[in-house]
């Protein structure tokens, strides 16, 4: 009986903690004010299979690089502050 109650309590806590974050997916950007958006196109470089691809663009005078691999949920980010090639962008 004690194991049953413990399992029930653990399940209830897990259910409550998971439902607490459920609304976040349906309300993007509701937690913080949003500044300017940069929706301009990025230059992309695609590499052969087995290598990461790269996208780059300027934002407020800084060059931003993002490395990604297909639709994988991970990537890498690098920023070149005050990039001279971003002066007029």
Image: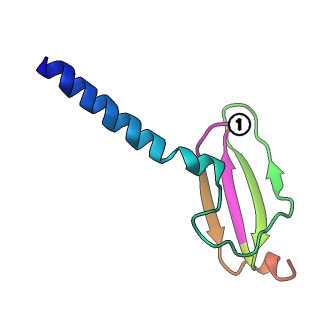
Instruction: Give the residue at x 70% y 81%.
Output: 82
In this view, the residue in front, 19 or 39, is 19
89 over 76 or under it: above or below: below
13 over 42 or under it: above or below: above
Which residue bears the numbered disc 1?
A: 70
Q: In the displayed image of the protein, which residue is found farthest to the top?
A: 1
Q: Quadrant of residue 89?
A: bottom right
Instruction: Give the residue at x 65% y 61%.
Output: 29
Q: Is residue 87 left or right of residue 21?
A: right
Q: Is residue 50 left or right of residue 3?
A: right
Instruction: Look at the image and say whether residue 72 sits in the magenta stretch.
Output: yes
Give the image location of residue 53, x and y in percent. Answer: 72, 45
Instruction: Give the residue at x 80% y 49%.
Output: 45
Instruction: Look at the image and say whether residue 29 sits in the magenta stretch.
Output: no
Q: Quadrant of the N terminus?
A: top left
Q: Quadrant of residue 87?
A: bottom right
- Mark 1, Cα crowd under 10 Å, few <14 / some 14-19 / many 20+, is few
What residue span does the magenta drawing correspond to?
A: 63-75
Give the image location of residue 46, x and y in percent. Answer: 79, 43
Q: In the displayed image of the protein, which residue is found farthest to the left?
A: 2
Q: Quadrant of residue 50?
A: top right
């Amino acid at each position: 009986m004690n194991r049953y109650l413990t399992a029930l309590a653990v399940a209830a806590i897990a259910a409550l903690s998971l439902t607490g974050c459920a609304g976040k997916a349906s309300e993007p950007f509701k937690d913080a004010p949003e500044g300017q958006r940069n929706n301009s196109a990025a230059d992309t470089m695609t590499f052969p299979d087995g290598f990461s691809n790269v996208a780059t663009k300027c934002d407020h005078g800084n060059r931003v690089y993002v490395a990604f691999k297909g639709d994988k949920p991970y990537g890498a980010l690098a920023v070149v502050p005050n990039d001279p090639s971003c002066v007029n962008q």
